Image: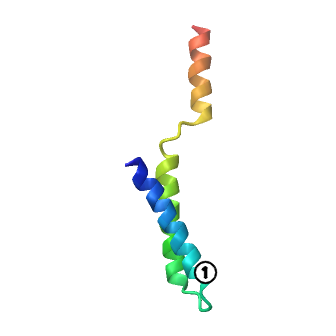
Amino acid sequence: MKYFNYILIVIGAIVALYSKAGTEQNQYVLIGGIVVLMIGIYRISRNIPSKNDEDNTQDTSEEE
């Protein structure tokens, strides 16, 4: 499933760059590529723990 997120990011970036490369820019393709890119980034960032949450758990264990 992790690789699926990376594939989404790569496909979104390629589609966004492809739509920008032509002389007549297709805005719907550009928007679609950016949406796919953002979905991939969001899905990856969901699994990264917050730095603040990590600090809070260390502080509470030190106080006990």
Residue beneath label 1, please?
Answer: 20
How far from the left and from the top, in percent, is residue 32?
Answer: 48, 74
- Please name whichever residue, 2 or 64, is drawn nearer the observer in this view of the structure: 2
By what rule are the colours in the image chosen?
A: rainbow
Can you give x and y, in whole percent of width and height, for residue 63 in the image?
61, 10
Q: Residue furthest top?
A: 64
Q: Position of residue 52 (x, y in %)?
A: 62, 32
Q: Is residue 23 left or right of residue 2?
A: right
Residue appearing at x 37%, y 49% in the figure: 1
**Left/right of residue 60 with respect to residue 44 in the rendered view:** right
Q: Residue at x 47, y 55 (%)?
A: 6
Please tell me which residue is depicted at 55% across the width and 83% down the height of the picture: 27
Q: Nearer the viewer, residue 18 or 28?
A: 18
Q: Quadrant of the C terminus?
A: top right
Amino acid type, residue under disc 1 in the picture: Lys
Label 1 secondary element? helix
Query: In the displayed structure, would residue 44 be above or below residue 40?
Result: above
Among all residues in the image, which is located at the extreme bottom?
24
Q: Quadrant of residue 57?
A: top right
Q: As displayed, is residue 26 above or below residue 41?
A: below
Which residue lies at the image location 48% right of the left edge and 66% below the top edge? 11
